[in-house]
Image (spheres, rainbow, N blue to C red):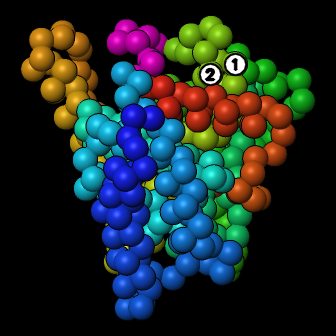
Amino acid sequence: MSQNKNELAMIKKDTVDVVAEKVKAFQENGDVHFPPSYSPQNAMKSAWLTLQGIQDKNKRPALEVCTRDSVANSLLDMVVQGLNPAKKQGYFIVYGNTLTFQRSYFGTMAVTKQVTGAKSIDAAVIYEGDEVDYEMKNSRIVNLTHKQKFGNINKENIIGAYATIVLQDGEVYQELMTIEELRKAWSKAQFWGKDQEKEKKGSTHDEFKQEMAKKSVINRACKKFLNSSNDSNLVLDHFNHTDEAAEEAQLEEEIQTNANGEIIDIEYNEPEQEQEPEQPSDQPDGDLEQAAMDFEQKEAQTTSGPNF
């Protein structure tokens, strides 16, 4: 990293220290309440260490190219949501001279549990030959049943996925996506080609299709449920700002790239009420999910678009 210790100290003073004071004021005013297990100070220490290793797509240090306002805002978004990059609950990504914080789907699950008091958040994949039945009540899925035979399990035969959020009082919220809807969500990532209709052989979304499907339907369920359950929550404000800031920064970077003479094909999509809940813990279960999560982190750090 090209910055010396004095430069880093100045950046830290203008970002981390400013955010720490703002968060302290939020706490004193009762605007935000963190779980007992969450330490804003420790989260910011982890974030600061992480930021010193983040680079843009040209391998330049993020703290060298990004505005201090964007660094401070990304830290604030992270802390108010009660997230910590050390737990792989989100990633810092550079767009031009703007730093953004983007949640992983484990981060999305953590925020959902914090805001709604959800007891569990789970997802399951539907394969060809499975029996799925449900009713619609007030435009919501209810009484969903899913019967599956072991022989149906094959990543090439996935036809959909669903997520289930269970609250403390037993209320259940469910979201279902077809394979077409899943691929539409995946197509928003930069690595998805313009005319690509399905996941490429050997890609993350091919090798780990089950986990990617669960991740996407969990994201959508959490975001829809959060935005329908509370519209006056500081955490929710920053939850939505995280996504909006990433969309705006990405679009601005693409516009600047065009203005500099590079011909690219821009297809801007309005952000959906979509993305990644049960989170039994902050750590995934099983080698398959861990591998998929490692791929997610790698892609988030090497692409300029969110990974769905």
Residue 146 vs residue 116, the one in the foreground: 116
Instruction: Identify which amino acid the numbered label 2 is placed on.
Output: Thr
Instruction: Identify which amino acid the numbered label 1 is placed on.
Output: Glu
Kindly identify which residue carries mark 2: 204
In the drawing, does residue 3 fall left or right of residue 290?
left
Based on the picture, tell me whether residue 10 belongs to the magenta stretch. no
Rendered view: 297 above or below 103: above
Residue 105 vs residue 178, the one in the foreground: 105
Q: Is the magenta stretch mostly helix, strand or loop?
A: loop
Residue 30 vs residue 133, the one in the foreground: 30
Residue for point 12% across, 11% down: 261
Residue 248 vs residue 205, the one in the foreground: 248
Q: Give the range drawn in magenta.
A: 187-197
Please report contact status of discs 2 and 1: CB closer than 8 Å, yes or no.
yes
Residue for point 60% across, 73% down: 39
In the drawing, does residue 77 fall left or right of residue 152?
left
Q: Can residue 139 be seen in this view?
A: no
In the drawing, does residue 202 fall left or right of residue 1?
right
Examine the image and state in which quarter residue 63 appears: top left
Kindly identify which residue carries mark 1: 207
